[in-house]
Image (cartoon, rainbow, N blue to C red):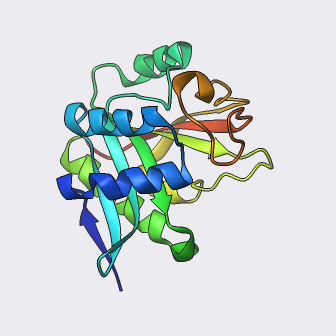
Amino acid sequence: MIEYLHINDDDLESMIELYKEYLNDGEFVEQELRRKYVECDYTGVKAVDGDKMAGFASMAKGLDFTYPHPELEERLRAIVADDIAYTGDAVVVREEYRGNGISHRMFEECYKLMCERKAKYILTELWIYPGGDIPAEDSVLSLGRVVYREYIEDFYKDLDKYGMTCPICGDHCSCSACIELHRTEVE
């Protein structure tokens, strides 16, 4: 039976392992996750099956992408202004647990966390694989009303310049992204 719990300090190593296996790998990944955990009000939800982490969904305070995209960040800051915003940093579910609604449930729990923290906006950066598949597309539906959406071709083309590799493409990523800014019901 899967339990949904808040992530904590003891989960960081398991999260790094899952992140590297299913999202990005490289020396930068571990350093960045450790930095965010300490500096960015990093929070989230884990799905646990006994003593095994089946997956996690995490959020970091602020507007943040896998690597900098200054013009896009500027457009989004104009919308968010001085309101509290969090970025969906990662959603990962081990392959053997996929197809059971785990990521959707984790995002529902993350939404509750964001509302408790008075976040008015949640930013998501959804990977679009070269074949057009958007793995987390349905999972983010519970994060609030979409007030901004943009599809960007080759969004991850410079991953290698930031010390990361794509789990789909390797060193030269051709994945695109769907950027969404969700408005919560927090007033």
- The residue at the point 78 percent across, 44 percent down is 130
Q: Quadrant of residue 99?
A: bottom right
**Residue occupying the far bottom of the picture:** 1
- The residue at the point 64 percent across, 37 percent down is 177
Q: Indicate the quadrant containing the C terminus: top left, top right, bottom left or bottom right.
A: top left
Relative to 163, 53 lies left or right: left
Q: Quadrant of residue 123?
A: top left
- The residue at the point 72 percent across, 29 percent down is 154
Question: Can the viewer see residue 81 in this picture?
Answer: yes
Question: Can the viewer see residue 141 in this picture?
Answer: no
Whether 109 is drawn above or below 131: the answer is below
Relative to 160, 47 lies left or right: left
Towards the viewer: 68 or 185 = 68
Whether 24 is drawn above or below 173: the answer is below
Instruction: Measuring from the top left, give residue 36's x and y in whole percent.
Output: 29, 35
Instruction: Measuring from the top left, give residue 174's x and y in whole percent.
Output: 74, 35
Instruction: Measuring from the top left, give residue 178's x and y in whole percent.
Output: 62, 38
**Residue occupying the far front of the picture:** 27
Q: Indicate the quadrant containing the N terminus: top left, top right, bottom left or bottom right.
A: bottom left
Whether 137 is drawn above or below 46: the answer is above
- The residue at the point 72 percent across, 32 percent down is 172
Instruction: Measuring from the top left, give residue 165's x and y in whole percent.
Output: 60, 37
Relative to 109, 124 lies left or right: right
